[in-house]
Image (cartoon, rainbow, N blue to C red):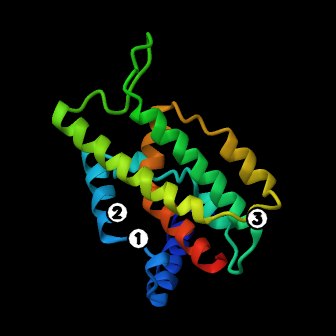
């Protein structure tokens, strides 16, 4: 699917959530502001971020509640757990290891780390409510398991897509719990 089709899908998904008016199916203003702050500081809005890292996850979500949707969302949120943990590790003292936050000033780094911890906590709270797991989406699961969470570009793309993934997980949560 092209990125324009993916964008249309996300807009439709967002419209469904907004039309429902439920706080469980939408991204809060705080989360949006924090994500935008991270995206601006880490320059996550450039053209190199167009390649949607998790587009197959969003595309795989069906309109009815299915256990495989929950499994895919849980697997996706597990990847985010690993990415957040990797970024937030303060001991990147290994030779040759790079940190996504190394180019930031101390103040920016502290602020971004605080914001990332907030996003991580919000994501973990949502993940805890997605308890139903059953059949696998083999291709999506294989793709998710192959994501290199240590790769700086993957980390940037994942952070750039966080709101959409959180939105999709919220929709799955609303439909299925």
Assess whether mark 1 and mark 2 are in contact (beta carbons under 8 angstroms).
yes
| Residue lying at 37% horizontally and 47% vertically, measured from the top left | 117
Q: Is residue 107 toward the left or the right of residue 124 in the image?
A: left
Assess whether mark 3 and mark 2 are in contact (beta carbons under 8 angstroms).
no
Q: Nearer the viewer, residue 57 or 91?
A: 91
| Residue lying at 43% horizontally and 79% vertically, measured from the top left | 23
Residue 112's place in the image compared with 12, above or below, is: above
Q: What label does residue 31 carry, if any?
A: 2
Percent coordinates x, y for residue 26 in the rendering: 44, 75
Q: Is residue 18 visible?
A: yes
Assess whether mark 3 and mark 1 are in contact (beta carbons under 8 angstroms).
no
Percent coordinates x, y for residue 89 in the rendering: 41, 29
Q: Between marks 2 and 1, how big is the CA–CA gap? A: 6 Å
Q: Residue furthest top?
A: 95
Mark 2 or 3, nearer chain start: 2
Q: Is residue 70 toward the left or the right of residue 81 in the image?
A: right
Q: Between marks 2 and 3, how big is the CA–CA gap? A: 26 Å
Residue 82's place in the image compared with 97, above or below, is: below
Reading the image, the residue beneath label 3 is: 68
Q: Tag 2: Cα neighbours inside 10 Å, few (<14), some, or many (≥20)?
A: some
Q: Nearer the viewer, residue 144 or 169?
A: 169
Q: Callout 1: helix, strand or loop?
A: loop
Percent coordinates x, y for residue 112 in the rendering: 28, 43
| Residue lying at 39% horizontally and 15% vertically, measured from the top left | 93
Q: Callout 3: helix, strand or loop?
A: helix
**Quadrant in which residue 74 is drawn:** bottom right
The mark tally for this picture is: 3
Residue 59's place in the image compared with 11, above or below, is: above
Quadrant position of the C terminus in the picture: bottom right
Q: What label does residue 27 carry, if any?
A: 1
**Quadrant in which residue 168 is drawn:** bottom right
Quadrant position of the N terminus in the picture: bottom right
């Amino acid at each position: 699917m092209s990125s324009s089709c993916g964008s249309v899908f996300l807009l439709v998904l967002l419209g469904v959530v907004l039309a429902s008016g439920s706080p469980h199916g939408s991204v809060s203003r705080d989360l949006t502001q924090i994500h935008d702050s991270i995206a601006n500081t880490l320059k996550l809005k450039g053209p190199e971020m167009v390649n949607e890292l998790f587009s197959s996850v969003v595309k795989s979500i069906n309109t009815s509640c299915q256990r495989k949707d929950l499994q895919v969302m849980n697997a996706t949120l597990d990847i985010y757990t690993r990415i957040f943990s990797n970024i937030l590790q303060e001991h990147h003292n290994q030779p040759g290891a790079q940190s996504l936050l190394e180019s930031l000033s101390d103040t920016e780094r502290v602020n971004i780390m605080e914001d990332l911890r907030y996003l991580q906590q919000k994501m973990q709270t949502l993940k805890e409510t997605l308890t139903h797991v059953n059949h696998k989406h083999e291709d999506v699961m294989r793709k998710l398991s192959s994501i290199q969470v240590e790769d700086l570009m993957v980390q940037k793309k994942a952070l750039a897509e966080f709101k959409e993934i959180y939105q999709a997980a919220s929709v799955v949560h609303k439909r299925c719990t």
